[in-house]
Image (spheres, rainbow, N blue to C red):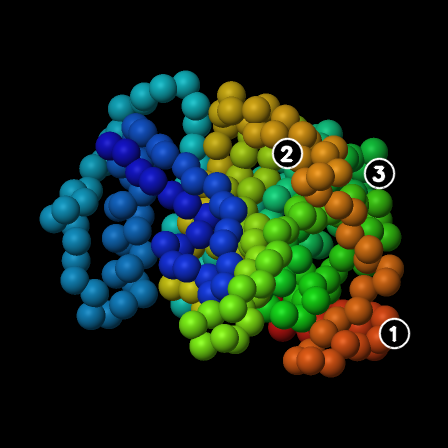
Amino acid sequence: PQAFISSRRFIDHPHAYSFEQSLVMQGPAAGLLPQLLNENLKQLVPSYTDLSTYFPSRTHYPTHGQESVNLTVDSARLAARDDRALAVKFLIGTKEEILIDQYMLYDRAIVDSIIKLKIKNPDLKVKILLDTNLDLEMNGLPNAIFLKEMKMYGIELKARKSLHWEEANSEDSIVQFHAINHRNLMIRDGKSVFMGTGPFMGSFERRSPISFGIQLNTAMSSELADSFMDDWDNVDTTYELDVENFEAKIGNRHLSHKVSSFLNTVFSVLLRAFD
């Protein structure tokens, strides 16, 4: 059996294009994935039509290949949030370096795990590439919420450079286009990879019906780490985020640095209290 998984749904973002990562699995893990999805949907939707005829249950899968895979399939509306738990467990296992490439990063469990890792091991290398949330038109929110705190602990933060242009549509209105970094990827010590189909945002699990978390112990990890670092070191591809001078935008109004900093503090407290 084979399975195709992507970090983005097959829909178009208005006035934008996106970069994402995809995965093709072959073997026992690919065979197990639809069964987990079927079991999850039965819990999520009472009127759900059982698809077990198409995904027959098997009690045993023979070993195939040399690479191990950990899988989670979760619903936003169920109490269990195993994709987040798998991501936290993945982070905790970091020894030397964690590379993170994310569309969203304001899930308090993920953020706090990263910060605690750095406090426990100050020599740990933590590099994060974030989307700048231009599609939300708030000049960096909500990804900006925890950035100042993370930088305070020595976590390195950059963003991918995004192409921007404007075009007139058929009604002679100006339409803006830009890129979205829709990757949801973590690379641990150049040996293991975590990939999620949903971004690390506190409300994601309650809004999106299904999310996948996948941990791969694969030889490709070092190649992905090299590709990440090539982009990280390339000034034509990435740039350092100016966390200290962040100014949010609400509608057409640009907020001062002081007000923006206050908002980030309030949002971080609320996320930690209620998520």
Mark sitting earlier along the chain (3/1): 3
Instruction: Tell whether 115 sits left or right of 179.
Output: right
Mark sitting earlier along the chain (3/2): 3
Measure the C-alpha gap from mark 3 to mark 1: 29 Å
- Label 3 sits on a secondary structure element that is loop
At 18% from the left and 45% from the top, the residue drawn is 55
At 63% from the left and 51% from the top, the residue drawn is 162
At 53% from the left and 39% from the top, the residue drawn is 194
The residue type indicated by label 2 comes to: Phe
Instruction: Tell whether 235 sits left or right of 176.
Output: right
Is 137 in front, or is 123?
137
Instruction: Tell whether 39 sits left or right of 72.
Output: left
Measure the C-alpha gap from mark 1 to mark 2: 33 Å
- Label 2 sits on a secondary structure element that is helix
- Label 1 sits on a secondary structure element that is helix
Measure the C-alpha gap from mark 3 to mark 2: 22 Å
Residue 137 x %, y %: 63, 70
Mark sitting earlier along the chain (1/2): 2
* On screen, residue 84 above or below 121: below
Residue of label 2: 228
| Residue 258 numbered tag | 1
Residue of label 3: 122
Is 85 in front, or is 254?
254
Residue 120 x %, y %: 80, 41
Residue 117, by quadrant, is top right
The residue type indicated by label 3 comes to: Pro
* On screen, residue 30 above or below 144: above
Residue 84 makes an appearance in the image: no
